[in-house]
Image: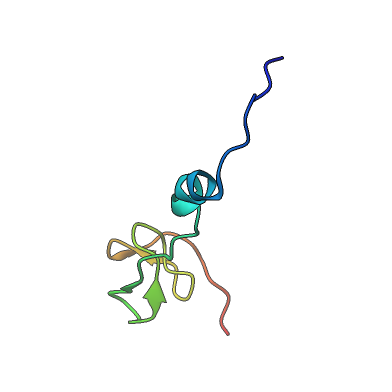
Amino acid sequence: MPNPKRRHSKRRTSTRRAHDFLKSYNISECSNCNEPKVPHRACPYCGHYKGREVIEVAAQ
């Protein structure tokens, strides 16, 4: 198994890790109940997606 001959510098390591951060979700508004939701997913509050109910949600 090959091993590195030289140590990577701090700059090279941090440059590689510059894109390793977590990205935040885009938040859109449900067209039925106006609650925040993730796009292209059924609303967790009312169960609607694209204008129709796709999952049943228990009353809160």
Question: Is 37 above or below relative to 2?
Answer: below
Picture quadrant where residue 59 is located: bottom right
Residue at image point 27% right, 74% down: 31
Give whichever of 7, 54 is nearer the camera. Answer: 7
> Residue 34: image x %, image y %?
33, 82
Residue at image point 72% right, 14% down: 1
Which residue reaches farthest right?
1
> Residue 26: image x %, image y %?
35, 66
Question: Is 21 above or below relative to 43?
Answer: above
Looking at the figure, which quarter contains the C terminus?
bottom right
Give whichever of 26, 10 is nearer the camera. Answer: 10
> Residue 52: image x %, image y %?
32, 63
Please, which colouring scheme is shown? rainbow
Which residue reaches farthest top?
1
Residue at image point 55% right, 49% down: 10
Which residue reaches farthest bottom?
60
Marker count (numbered): 0
Give whichever of 57, 18 is nearer the camera. Answer: 18
Residue at image point 64% right, 25% down: 4
Q: Is residue 59 left or right of residue 37?
A: right
Picture quadrant where residue 27 is located: bottom left
Give whichever of 48, 10 is nearer the camera. Answer: 10
